[in-house]
Amino acid sequence: MRSSVLPYGRQCIEEDDVSAVAAALRSDWITTGPRVGEFEARVAERVGARHAVAVNSGTAALHAALDAAPIRLGDEVIVPALTFAASANAVLYVGGTPVFADVRPDTFNLDPADVRRRLTPRTRAIVTVDYAGHPSDLDALGAVAREHGIVLIEDAAHALGAEYRGRPVGAIADLTTFSFHPVKAITTGEGGMVTTGDAERARRMRRFRNHGIETEAADRFRAGAWHYDMVELGFNYRLTDLQCALGLSQLDKLERFVARRAAIADRYRRALHGVPGLTLQAVAADVRHAWHLFVVVLTLEAFSGGRAEIAAALRAEGVGVSVHYAPVYRHPFYRGRGDAEGSCPVAERLAAALLTVPLFPAMTDADADSVVEALVKVVEHYRERP
Ligand SMILES: *Cc1c(COP(=O)(O)O)cnc(C)c1O
């Protein structure tokens, strides 16, 4: 048994990351300065997008993307039921109505066929989520969006470094959002980014993150000017130079991090394949999965204990597990906002039966093997009992 509990995810900060932040602290700019543009340019280059706009969280990235879409009062936006609440909350921030659609039983990603069933004359956008790092069905969703003249937004909080049919996630949807929260592929503490091929939307998002003001403080400083115009109601969603220093340093490691995640996922998949009572996320042949999360689905009918019991047993073995996610419409806040209850049966079944097990780049092979050992042991225990 493990002597300490492995978390399901955690950041990987190395000495050069610390030095990069220290250097930024000693420089002239600690908030919006040269590193913001540099980080944006590097992320844009990495994902093959024309524009990247840095903001201070993945949630702010969704908010900015929905504003730039533009989504306004009364517009409907289709969102998968199986996601973090932020994917839907951001729709409400701009006055839109989230309409929940179901996910596919194999990849756990938004089901394009169910999206078609939820379309109404008021539908203005789709927010698709690359669940656990597996790219969404971007061709099928893009076709729906084109046919109906609506916007495709990809919540790629899990999927920096992923590829769909040979193309990096970030250059495919109309707008793609990323998160740099500590459990995500790379971190800036808190942070986010939107990538887009649309110059006008990028310009709007730069203004949106800075109170709706047209110019940035650094530009005014250089020009020796004090006048500025606030032209719309925006927010302070700026990412700091300190955070971008960390982001730049982390971005250099993205390939190594994703490769390490993939190696651990591969180890898990080989060891867990065929274990009775467990099923795993299917991986499409034409994607590169970013492996933000590793999820196992319990065949609950086969067990004498429920998920909570199994999760507690795993934790007692030193394996920190989590659940990604409860269907968004089951949260108390969403109950009574439309009647989505029961409307996404696949998401509900998965949400009741899945467990996220530890996966992060700093894990050792021995850590991964201890997770497998604990899973097999606990699953066997609950399967065998009458
Ligand atoms: C993490 C996450 C977000 C929000 O990102 P923050 O940086 O925490 O605001 C949004 N959507 C999904 C699917 C996420 O996992």
Image (spheres, rainbow, N blue to C red):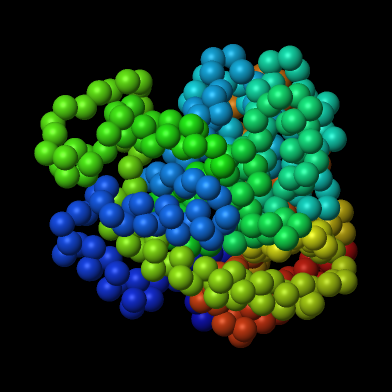
Q: Quadrant of residue 243?
A: bottom left
Give the residue drawn at x 29%, y 28%.
213
Figure check: 92 above or below 40: above
Residue that appears at 52% across and 81% down: 3
Q: Which residue is nearer to you in this view: 167 or 159?
A: 167
Residue 203: name its quadrant. top left
Corner quadrant of residue 164:
bottom right
Taking depth in this image into account, of 332 and 295 the one nearest to the observer is: 295
Residue 370 screen position, x and y as percent: 64, 80
Position of residue 376 measured from the top left corner of the image (x, y, whole percent):
76, 74
- Residue 184 shows in this picture: no
Does residue 123 appear left or right of residue 186 in this picture?
Answer: right
Residue at position x 35%, y 39% from top?
237
In the displayed structure image, the side of residue 111 where residue 189 appears, left or right: left
Q: Is residue 114 left or right of residue 219?
A: right
Query: Residue at horizontal 73%, vertical 31%?
Result: 145
Quadrant into which the C terminus falls = bottom right
User: Can you see residue 36?
Assistant: yes
- Above/below status of 241 relative to 276: above
When the figure is inspected, residue 52 is found, relative to residue 141, above or below; the finding is below
Residue reaching furthest to the bottom: 366
Report x, y in % for residue 130: 66, 50
Where is residue 300 shown, x and y percent of the image? 82, 55
